[in-house]
Amino acid sequence: MAGASHGAPDGVLLLAGVPLGDPADASARLRDALATADVVAAEDTRRLARLASALGVTVGGRVVSFYEDVEASRVPGLVAAVRDGSTVLVVSDAGMPTVSDPGYRLVTACVEAGLAVRCLPGPSAVLAALAVSGLPTDRFCFEGFAPRADGRRRTWLRSLATESRTAVFFESPRRLASLLAVAVEVLGGDRAGAICRELTKTHEEVVRGPLADLAAWAGARDVLGEVTVVLGPAVVVTPEPEDLAEEVLGLVADGRRLKDAARDVATVHGVSTKALYDATVQLRK
């Protein structure tokens, strides 16, 4: 059974959150893991070297590159290393592995093999941006990177038009202005949002406001650095039954029974079927 580890060797896959920018955010457990892991799978080996130097840590194990283009080919060897008793540490450029970074394939392969998978908690751009955005945090969703192609981007934004949770996603600084311009078209300029740039770094900046203001801000400058966008939840206004009665009568004119038409329209708009039925009857008098 996937996830079972009875009789498994002592090897373990460790997923470690690394600093978004400030090395001082590194945990003591991360420092220890960098020094003691048998294998360190790094999204960028050069960034790993800089991080280790900044932390005053010598990476003791074998270092392998583990970026998107080689991830699939590296998985079998890393799984074998865990199975043979090694501690394999996975680190991304910044934040948590597997969150829009390599690691998911390796985790699923280890789980399927019944091998131990553990996490060393650490920084996450998603949670950091959500926390400082000033937008609701009780319910949220993570959308990864925004689609690049205009058609897919518009379709994706339309899917967020009625999203009742705060949405967090990543975007390239080069595409931010065009994304926000389209977001204003699709979602409206009043939708609340926040742009979180260079979190924890020297030039950290958080800009909050309605989408129209954010689009104007991004369009007036060359945005640089890592960008996380937080989109506030949609404000869904439930219409009054009286406002929907004409829609029901339109369906009745097309041959639908009044009762069925009222039920269908009420379901779509989230109002009481009885109240809509009564309002439609009143309108017909």
Image (cartoon, rainbow, N blue to C red):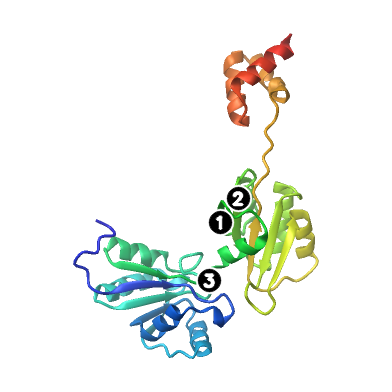
Near-viewer residue (198 or 170): 198
Near-viewer residue (110 or 146): 110
Q: Which residue is mark 2?
A: 156
Residue 237: x and y, percent?
Answer: 69, 37
- Secondary structure at badge 3 equals loop
Decide which of tag 1 and tag 3 comes sooner along the chain: 3
Q: Which residue is mark 1?
A: 143
* Residue occupying image coordinates x 49% and y 69%: 96
Residue type at numbered disc 1: Glu
Decide which of tag 3 and tag 2 comes sooner along the chain: 3
Where 284 sits versus 69, above or below? above
Q: Nearer the viewer, mark 1 or mark 3?
A: 3
Residue type at numbered disc 3: Pro
Distance between the Cα atoms at labels 1 and 3?
A: 18 Å
Q: Pointer 3: residues within 10 angstroms few (<14), some, or many (20+)?
A: many
- Secondary structure at badge 1 equals strand
Residue 250: x and y, percent?
Answer: 68, 19
Residue 23: x and y, percent?
Answer: 55, 82
Near-viewer residue (65 or 187): 187
Q: Which mark is residue 123?
A: 3
* Residue occupying image coordinates x 53% and y 74%: 94
- Quick check: 280 left or right of 93? right
Asked if the residue under mark 1 is in contact with the one under mark 2, i.e. CB atoms within 8 Å, the reply is: yes
Distance between the Cα atoms at labels 2 and 1?
A: 10 Å
- Secondary structure at badge 2 equals helix
Residue type at numbered disc 2: Trp
